Image: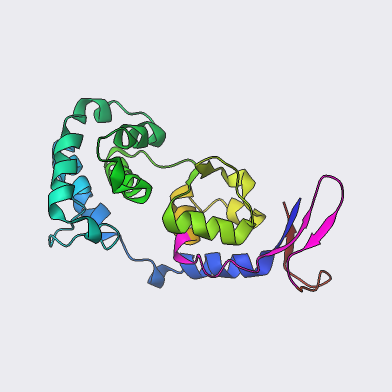
Amino acid sequence: MRTYDNTKIEEIISRYKKPYKKKKDAWVQHCLCQNSLKEVIRVAAQCADDGNLIHPHQKRLGRERLKMLALELLEYEDEISQARHFDNLLNIINRTRHRVIGKQTNYEIAFRIGCYLKLYPDRIYLHAGTHQGALNLMGKLPRNSFLVISELPQPFHRSDLEPWEIIEILSIYKDKWQGCLVETYLASGTYHPQHAFDLHGNGVCYL
């Protein structure tokens, strides 16, 4: 069992949820403005906004490689249109020949298309910054490529927090999570303190 600094986690989540700090994703918005799924797939895979600016996460890949990926994904248009869950959509994109593109880009392309199709993640996919953030928060991760909300500390269980937002929070604040894990109890009852923290103070939650 793990014990977390509940107060610190809630403060970070609240910082993310502040309305004036949350900006609409220009790349998602550009996809939502398209008139057909074909155009959404092309725009999502090319990772460009309405000003033709490539998303910073995909800039290193270059326009030519992203155009090739878009052409390949268009071959899956029928299959994409029949997806009923976000995981179905992500699996289609993961099957492309351009796997070298990377897990984060595959997820972000799937998310852009998913927003158009109203298919959203129901789990926490671990890639790049999200993986590092979860590792800094929890100390040790399962071998799966994802987490479910019930595996996360209690502050993440709030009803106004969607899985895709948790993915963002873990990534954006990946360097802030260190120190949130206070202690770990093994099945044997062995106690492993993670850092100095007053266990009689406020802000401790148990998972």
Residue beneath the point at 40% across and 71% down = 21
Between 115 and 70, the one nearer to me in the picture: 70
Please provide percent x and percent y for residue 53: 16, 62
The one nearer the camera, 186 or 38, is 186
| Residue 33 appears in the figure | no
Q: Residue at x 46, y 60 (%)?
A: 171
Q: Is residue 126 left or right of residue 100?
A: right
Which one is nearer the viewer's eye here, 203 or 60? 60
Asked if residue 68 is positioned above or below residue 175 in the image, the reply reads: above
Residue depicted at x 12% and y 62%: 51
Left or right of 200: which side holds 57?
Answer: left
Q: Main secondary structure of the magenta part?
A: loop
User: Up-down: is 35 above or below 2?
Assistant: above
Please tell me whether residue 178 belongs to the stretch shown in magenta: yes
Is 43 placed above or below 184 here? above
Task: Indicate the position of residue 33 as horizontal and vertical percent values.
Answer: 17, 49
* Image location (x, y in percent) of residue 202: 76, 71
Relative placement, left or right, of 92 versus 11 is left
